[in-house]
């Protein structure tokens, strides 16, 4: 025995063992002994008879018609279309939109440049229109595949309305007169 300890770290289980020693320790047979190649036959094997695939219950459930889902999806899309079309005048006339927002907030303010908000309103209207088209297309594809689709118009409505509202708030938040009026109304 040596008086100096071994500087190497103590090996973990199986770290230095050969594959044969590992198999012997865990009582597993040699892989070469278990899987011997199958004998090669000179005769051709007849192909299996063709069987038509039968839909499993899980597949049949995803493909069946869901009339309530269709009705709710189309109702939500129709509501979204009416909302998008009816919001165009308010979005494009940004000055009246800003006055309405100031009235709701209870702030006595006017925009420094009301014409600067018009491009933002047009962009918000464009986002809503494109968002409705994307939502309708995704809903239609999902319905054609037989998937549950009622949630797509809801998510699309929330996402594109949020983006549109953010676009409408940019000119309000960049106007120093509006900020002064908001700060003075808080005090």
Image (spheres, rainbow, N blue to C red):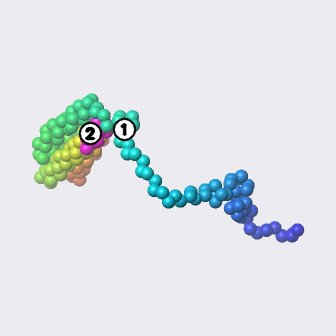
In-front residue for pair 111/96: 96
- The local secondary structure at tag 1 comes to loop
Vertical relation: 133 (above or below) 58: below
Residue 81 position, x and y percent, is 17, 39
Question: Residue 35: within the magenta?
Answer: no
In-front residue for pair 105/46: 46
Residue 109 position, x and y percent, is 18, 44
Residue 46 position, x and y percent, is 43, 51
Q: Residue at x 88, y 68 (%)?
A: 1
Q: Residue at x 25, y 41 (%)?
A: 144
**Residue found farthest to the right:** 1
Q: Residue at x 23, y 31 (%)?
A: 71
Q: Earlier in the sequence, mark 2 or mark 1?
A: 1
Image quadrant where one finds the C terminus? top left
Q: Residue at x 23, y 42 (%)?
A: 140
Pointer 1: what residue? 55
Vertical relation: 67 (above or below) 169: above
Region rendered in magenta: 141-150
On the rendered structure, is 126 left or right of 155?
left
Pointer 2: what residue? 143
On the rendered structure, is 88 left or right of 67?
left
- The local secondary structure at tag 2 comes to helix
**Residue found farthest to the top:** 68
Vertical relation: 187 (above or below) 68: below
Q: Quadrant of residue 52?
A: top left
Real-space Cα separation, disc 2 to disc 1, in angstroms: 19 Å
Question: Residue 144: within the magenta?
Answer: yes
């Amino acid at each position: 025995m040596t008086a100096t300890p071994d500087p190497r770290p103590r090996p973990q289980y199986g770290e230095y063992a050969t594959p044969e020693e590992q198999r012997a320790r865990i009582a597993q047979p040699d892989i070469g002994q278990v899987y011997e190649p199958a004998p090669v036959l000179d005769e051709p094997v007849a192909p299996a008879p063709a069987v038509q695939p039968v839909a499993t219950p899980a597949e049949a459930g995803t493909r069946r018609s869901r009339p309530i889902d269709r009705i709710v999806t189309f109702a939500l899309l129709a509501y979204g279309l009416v909302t998008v079309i009816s919001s165009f005048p308010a979005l494009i006339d940004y000055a009246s939109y800003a006055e309405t927002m100031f009235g709701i907030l209870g702030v006595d303010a006017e925009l420094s440049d009301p014409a600067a908000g018009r491009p933002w309103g047009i962009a918000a209207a464009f986002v809503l229109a494109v968002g409705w088209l994307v939502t309708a297309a995704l809903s239609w594809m999902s319905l054609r595949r037989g998937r549950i689709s009622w949630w797509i118009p809801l998510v699309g409505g929330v996402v594109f309305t949020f983006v549109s509202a953010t676009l409408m708030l940019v000119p309000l938040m960049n106007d120093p007169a509006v900020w002064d009026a908001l700060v003075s109304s808080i005090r």
